[in-house]
Amino acid sequence: MICEHCKQRHASVTVTTVQNGQTVEKHYCDHCASKFHPFQTEIQEEPVALHQLISNWFGVPMWKNAQTEEKKTTQNACPSCGFTYRQFLKQGKFGCAECYSTFREQLPPVLSRLQAGTKHTGKSVAVSVEQLKQKIEEIRQQMQYAIEEERFEDAAKMRDEIKSIQHKLDAGGVDV
Amino acid sequence: MNIEHFLKQAPKCMMGNGEDSDIVMTTRIRLARNMANTRFPLSFSQQEANEVQEKLMKALLMPQEQLNFSYFRMADLSPLERQLLVEKHLISPYLAKHKEVAAVFLSGDESTSVMVNEEDHVRIQVLSAGLQLMETYERASELDDRLGKQVSYAYDEQFGYLTSCPTNVGTGLRASIMMHLPALTMSKQMNVLIQMMTRLGMVVRGIYGEGSENLGNIYQISNQVTLGKSEREILDELQKVVEQIIEKERNARKKLLERAHVTLDDRVNRALGTLRYARVLTSEEAATCLSNVRLGVDLKLIQGISPSSLNECVMFIQPGFVQQYAGTVLDAVDRDIYRAKYVQEKLGEDRLTTGEKGEETYDV
Ligand SMILES: [Zn+2]
Ligand SMILES: [Zn+2]
């Protein structure tokens, strides 16, 4: 079999990717297979742009495929860091955590090419002291409203909730 | 502790005799984390960078946590000091380069480092000798839990721990095993094995960084996937691959001994001769000879050299350490001269203390 990318050398590596839940097999020569490897984005000084990686993967430039998509997404900039989706493709990196929410819809196809899936199944995050304090502050405010509106039963519930969070806080935060 | 403490010797954690330490040199676990509501280092402001540093100092230097970290801002270190930390694998080259924003917390035994404002706000790294994936991960994870209670991490129900690069998102876990594979390299099996490992979702590269793919026959094998698998799955898969490679290396060594005993004996002893008597040593030649001598020691073709001295040499033949040894900045030519001098001294020490030190069991 001939390499699907350079169409010159003998294909000796089979790369299996999952796309929209379907397993797709691609055949490459040693040379091309090593170039696609996503770790190159990590070790090179100037990272191989992710769009390059993705378009290499299909042998066609990404935005020739998705011109309409591009128009829509270039206007869509992350409110916190100003990154556009196009910028993300170019750099292969996100500017901030909010990028993940901003581009949530577009990410699964990208991630499924780099990763084993698109859903985190590992360790979940601990609740920090900071977050617990914030939560107490929020409930305290709601409790204030409840008291003003004479919903005393609600207010009592909120007071108990604050107490239980305060308890967790004294224990130094807890896992979810 | 001051920075000198961290620059003199090879990390103690690299000198131990962990499991399979004749083939596996070290296990390294890295967890990438970011703070909530702060932009990633790629796009944050100097002020945000300082805030990240301050928050982490509060969390990690708290006396009640008893973590006993020493803290260094990259900007406060000299270029050589930064380079030495990189050569010891205590920090990444990326961290050393972004000195205006970056800092590091180091544990006294050098097994744990927390890099601040690398590509992500937080990179927890734990190093151990030999093959100890689970144990090393547990230590990193425990520190992660403690830190996660002090500061709020950027986390998403769907995508897990959020990182600047999508190749780290999810668990943020990169587990790396550093292996010495001379027999597989000599018998030209590595290319096929690297392909196999790549297909299994592993990343393989050399230890002295890019472009040095198999200098000294040392390879670093890590997981590629961080999302869609749990930490345990990732570690189990890497463990299985590494165990297979260990077995293949042992078989290849056995075959070399059976089929080419004299050639092998000659090669490893010539390498020892070079290390002992050369007056000029390039890093490539030093790395190759150290690899051969190490193989000779493992196969009991060479006596009286301790594996830990060789491990130390592997680290100390790097340019930064050679210059520290010389006590001055050197050009490449002079570095080769001082490198030869250092190696001779180090291996000479062993000859004086010959005996128990060189005894290491190697079960075929
Ligand atoms: Zn090809
Ligand atoms: Zn953003």
Image (spheres, coloured by chain):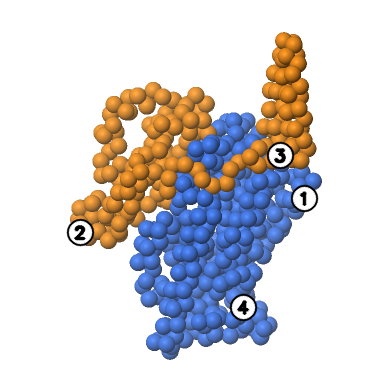
Chain colours: A orange, B blue
Q: Is residue A117 above or below residue B283?
A: above
- Report the amino acid beneath label 3: Gly
Picture quadrant of residue A75? top left
Compute the Cα span from label 4 to label 2.
Answer: 50 Å
Q: Is residue A5 above or below residue B215?
A: above
On screen, residue B101 versus residue A170, left or right, reads left
x%, y% of residue B332?
50, 62
Of B333 and B342, the residue lying toward us: B342
Q: Which residue is mark 4?
A: B306
Specify few, some or many for label 4: CA neighbours under 10 Å numbering under 14, 14-19, or 20 or more: many
Disc assigned to residue A1: 2
Compute the Cα span from label 3 to label 4.
Answer: 47 Å
Of B226 and B267, the residue lying toward us: B226
Which chain is mark 4 on?
B
Compute the Cα span from label 1 to label 3.
Answer: 18 Å
**Front tag of 2 and 1:** 2
